[in-house]
Image (tube, rainbow, N blue to C red):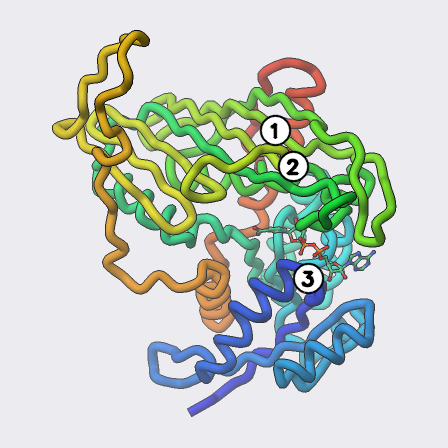
Amino acid sequence: MTTRTLRIAMNGITGRMGYRQHLLRSILPIRDQGGLTLPNGDKVQVEPILVGRRENALAEIAEQHDVAEWTTDLDAVIADERTDIVFDASMTSLRAGTLTKAMKAGKHIFTEKPTAETLSEAIELARLRQETGVTAGVVHDKLYLPGLVKLRRLVDEGFFGRILSLRGEFGYWVFEGDHQAAQRPSWNYRKEDGGGMTTDMFCHWNYVLEGILGSVKSVTAKTITHIPTRWDEQGKEYPATADDAAYGIFEVAGPSGEEIVAQINSSWAVRVYRDELVEFQVDGTHGSAVAGLRNCVAQQRAHTPKPVWNPDLPATEPFRDQWLEVPANDDLDNGFKAQWEEFLRDVLAGREHRYDLLSAARGVQLAEAGLASSAEGRRIALEPISL
Ligand SMILES: NC(=O)c1ccc[n+]([C@@H]2O[C@H](COP(=O)([O-])OP(=O)(O)OC[C@H]3O[C@@H](n4cnc5c(N)ncnc54)[C@H](O)[C@@H]3O)[C@@H](O)[C@H]2O)c1
């Protein structure tokens, strides 16, 4: 029996992430499966309210997906006492303002990352959550990906022995937009609009490193704009003012304080010679694993070959064949939907969500420190954040 309906105002729903991952892959499937079933058997339904700037686009999406309500008045929907949750997937630069208004109005919030453009704003948001007592969740989608769920399981089972290092490769070629349209929005390449690889990805890398290995203690990064000129959605040439690649080294403290070195390359100016668009290799004394978005392969110490360096001979070892697939052993749903469901259960139970605004603030801190490290040409130690 449906006992309650949660009304969720979804801002930025015409965007790439808002539409595909949050509406299409998360909230509509939750609605269409009849909502969430609580431990006592009761059902809680969800009802999205689409929020954006363009009436036509909103009306079209609402019609197409049988959504009853949409509005261009963000302030009114935040103030509306019937709204339970405010979700934001709009442009990064507008986020802190929207989240602040929503929490002050007593709404629970779920939001895309980064939560803010500066660390002080991100900390302010975490403080406001503490004051208002609302439930706040920030997208930590990578930790819900099947590949990373398998990798985390290997860590939990002690597969690696002592973990030594992590190497990550993220990226693909994003077209400039002149001869072929770019496959990402142009604001991503303008610093003044909140764009940039470091701002975008280091907040992901912070929770990935925390979630798999331990807390990040320092960063040394080189950020760069490889492609200085791009063409926007209207075919107009513009200067790319934001970094489109970031090469980072992160010192991580494992659970017993052991030092783990993580290196992650992030680039929108790289061509893919990998199995997936992001891949992480973890090496430990007893085993190693490589995880992508979906797959994870592992190699134990006992199965480790003994290569001998000899450039005069062709490689005889079939290195890739020497790894074993790690099975899912479970039904791993879309990561965004899985986190939404967990968040909604937290809202209903009146408790905090584990991936909150403080974790998001550490992500923003890492991005800021990465940019500063590159600008100043030095390693930056990260101070613990307290509220
Ligand atoms: N979790 C992830 O893996 C992931 C991936 C990509 C982007 N993101 C984040 O999601 C957010 C949206 O990114 P996207 O790629 O979907 O961008 P997008 O440009 O496709 O969508 C942005 C949305 O904001 C709206 N918008 C743009 N300019 C606006 C303005 N001036 N005023 C009001 N609304 C405006 C657009 O209409 C659209 O609905 C960003 O904060 C980004 O960092 C997260």
Residue 119 appears at what percent x and percent y? 68, 37
Question: Does the residue at mark 1 contact the one at mark 3 (Cβ under 8 Å)?
Answer: no
Crowd rating for badge 3 (residues with CA inside 10 Å; few <14, some 14–19, many 20+): many
Residue 365 visible in the snapshot: no
222 over 127 or under it: above or below: above
Query: Which residue in the protein does label 3 denote?
Result: 103
Residue behind mark 2 = 197
Looking at the image, residue 302 lies above or below residue 16: above
Separation of marks 2 and 3 at Cα, in angstroms: 28 Å
Near-viewer residue (302 or 87) = 302
Q: Quadrant of the C terminus?
A: top right
Q: Quadrant of residue 164?
A: top left
Element marked by disc 1: strand
Element on which disc 2 rests: helix
Left or right, 360 with reference to 336: right
The residue positioned 47% from the left and 61% from the top of the image is 339
Query: Is residue 112 visible to the viewer in this orientation of the structure?
Result: yes
User: What is the three-letter code of the residue carrying label 2?
Assistant: Met
Q: Residue furthest left?
A: 302
Q: Earlier in the sequence, mark 2 or mark 3?
A: 3
For this orientation, the residue located farthest to the bottom is 1
For the residues marked 1 and 2, what is the alpha-carbon distance in whole angstroms? 6 Å
1 or 3: tag closer to the N-terminus: 3
Q: CA distance from mark 1 to mark 3?
A: 33 Å
Q: Earlier in the sequence, mark 1 or mark 2?
A: 2
**Eyeballing the image, is 347 above or below 176?**
below
Report if the CB atoms under discs 1 and 2 are less than 8 Å apart: yes
Give the quarter the ligand 1 occupies. Answer: bottom right
Residue 138 placement, left or right of 190:
left
Residue 246 circle label: 1
The numbered mark at residue 302 is none
Give the residue at x 66% y 20%: 374
